[in-house]
Amino acid sequence: MNTRLLPLCAALIAALPLAAPAQTTTAPTARPLTLRYKWTPGEVQHYKATMDMNITMDMTGLGPKAPGLMPPMIGHTTMAYDLTVQSVNPADGSATLTEHITQMSATLNGKPMPGMETGLDANKGDVTLVLSPLGKMLSMHLPVSDAGKLPPGMDLSKIGEATPATLPSFPAHVGDTWQDNTTMHLFNQMPGMAALQTTVFSTLAGISKDAHPIAGIRQTSQGTLNGAMPAGAAGKLDMTGQFQDDSLVKFDVDNGSMLGQDGTLTMNTHVAMPNTPATGKTMQMRTRMQMTTHLERLPSAP
């Protein structure tokens, strides 16, 4: 597991796509709100994220001693990280931020995963993000030392092309909705690799009536995973899958910043490799993953 990617999971799940809005409007009861991120160079935001995963796998075609239905893997990850605003582009309002992990721990089936703190100490470089005022990730770059450890052809700098924004592009009333369709290719240099196609539906679910208003943005998504890759003498490994996600983003209207996000994700995948050399049979692997995430902004130190 590349521990540098763990804190980004919560950030990516918290962000949801946006393009030209397919807008519907309920009868307005207040003035519409223009929701935008507001950044100040030098500002530091502190976040804590937790992720709980339950993964089950069923494997066939590996021979008579194959385990078949494998025991579930139950994982829990906790991390804290800082986002520092390095600069703001006055032309489009986008911001360049660095993400620095300050704490990270994980367990698998109740047992601590060794090496987490060691990996944290060994990776002092920061992840660099460029975000639009709508919260869309325009680009992401890992430290050079970590980028060199990625699988061949994997280009995370392109991830912004498929990751969604959080906020509506139009002044919105409570009840307004919008949607977007995206396609993600992480392995841009490897034709045939699985592509994740997603449709996301977003709704401005409510605005708190406190003196410091908080917007609640409900986002649901569904998608499919389809692709194939060379698998040596076995031919091609085919992968298909489906996923569903539901999350609620809490956005500070006046300060223009995310306060938190809670989400659930369910994904089912099926991998088939024909003519497994060891058995002469088709190897099949079915995986089901359920994940819950919690992201919250922590108060700044006095």
Image (tube, rainbow, N blue to C red):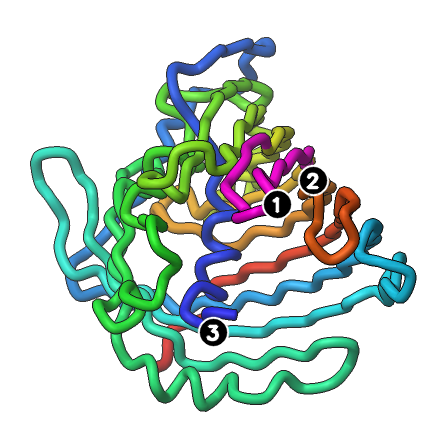
| For discs 3 and 2, the disc positioned in front in the rendered view | 2
Q: Is residue 114 magenta?
A: no
- Badges 1 and 2: C-beta atoms under 8 Å apart? yes
In primary-sequence order, the first of circles 1 and 2 is 1
Say the numbered circle drawn on residue 274.
2
Q: Which residue is mark 3?
A: 80
User: Taking 212 as reference, is 109 left or right?
Assistant: right
Q: CA distance from mark 1 to mark 3?
A: 43 Å
Count residues near mark 2 (Cα–Cα under 10 Å), then give few for <14, some for 14-19, many for 20+. some
- Percent position (x, y) of residue 56? 81, 57
Report the mark closest to the observer, 1 or 3. Answer: 1
Instruction: Read off the residue under disc 1.
Output: 234
Q: Is residue 271 left or right of residue 29?
A: right
The answer for how far apart the CA atoms under marks 1 and 2 are is 6 Å
Q: Which quarter of the image is occupied by the C terminus?
A: bottom left
Q: Is residue 83 above or below residue 284?
A: below
Main SS class of the magenta portion in the image: strand
Identify which amino acid the numbered label 3 is placed on: Ala
Q: Secondary structure at mark 3?
A: strand
Residues in magenta, as a range: 226-243
